[in-house]
Amino acid sequence: MYGLVNRSMKEYITLHFGDGVWEKVKETAGIETDTYISNRGYDDQETYAIVGALSQHVGLTPTEILEEFGVHWILHTGRKGYSELFEAGGENLQEFLENLPNFHTRISFILPKLSPPKFRVLEKGPGYIRLYYNSHRDGLQPFVVGLLRGLGEMYNTTLTIQHTLKRADGAKHDEFTIQW
């Protein structure tokens, strides 16, 4: 993953749990790095180790951490560092979700080695979207739920999110139904 993910994770940890917890997480995860370079690639296992170590120190499950980090990613990292891209994403939640493939295409110009997940709208109707999600990285579905919650907050939209099709159950991709 790019350093901007780990840098944002560090920000999430220090903001919500304090600098001391970040130091403990680094030690538990066996991480020597304290400063992440946004456009540099880091081993995915380092990010997973951070989540696992944080779970040990704060009593939240990795699933809960990833979901809350997804909210943080949208409301802090995304809006702060990529505000123009977020503004171009759409006037409302539905438009933003419909434009997700374009969003990742635009980010690839900034981060050329990016290997983003695939999102696409499979079905939509008044007040709902069924969203396709697929990634070569395992276990990030809770992060996606957090991203969706963060987008709901960004657009002042109350959501219900259902994980309706799961790779963990043998499917080839995941699907989420988002209602508002």
Image: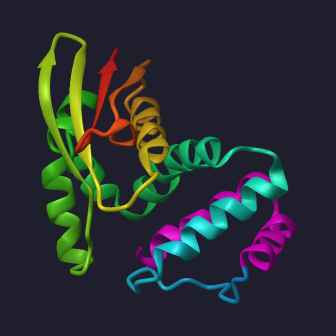
Is 26 left, or right, of 179 in this rendering?
Answer: right
> In what quadrant of the picture does the N terminus appear?
bottom left
Left or right? Give the position of 60 relative to 88: right
The residue furthest right is: 20
**Residue 25 lies in the magenta-colored region:** yes
Start-end of magenta stretch? 1-29
User: Quarter of the image holding residue 2?
Assistant: bottom left
Q: Residue at x 68, y 84 (%)?
A: 34
Against 152, residue 16 (above or below) is below
Q: Position of residue 12 (x, y in %)?
A: 64, 58
Residue 130, how many percent across, how many down? Answer: 22, 25
* 62 is higher (above) or lower (below) than 5: above
Helix, strand or loop for the magenta stretch, by majority: helix
Q: Residue at x 34, y 56 (%)?
A: 83
Residue drawn 44% across the image and 51% down it: 140
Asked whether, in this view, residue 130 is left or right of residue 149, the answer is left
Query: Quarter of the image containing the C terminus?
Result: top left
Question: Which residue is found at the position 44% from the left and 80% from the top?
Answer: 38
Q: Quadrant of residue 124?
A: top left
Q: How is the image coloured?
A: rainbow
Any part of residue 80 in sight = yes
Q: Residue 85's spot in the image, x, y percent?
A: 25, 56
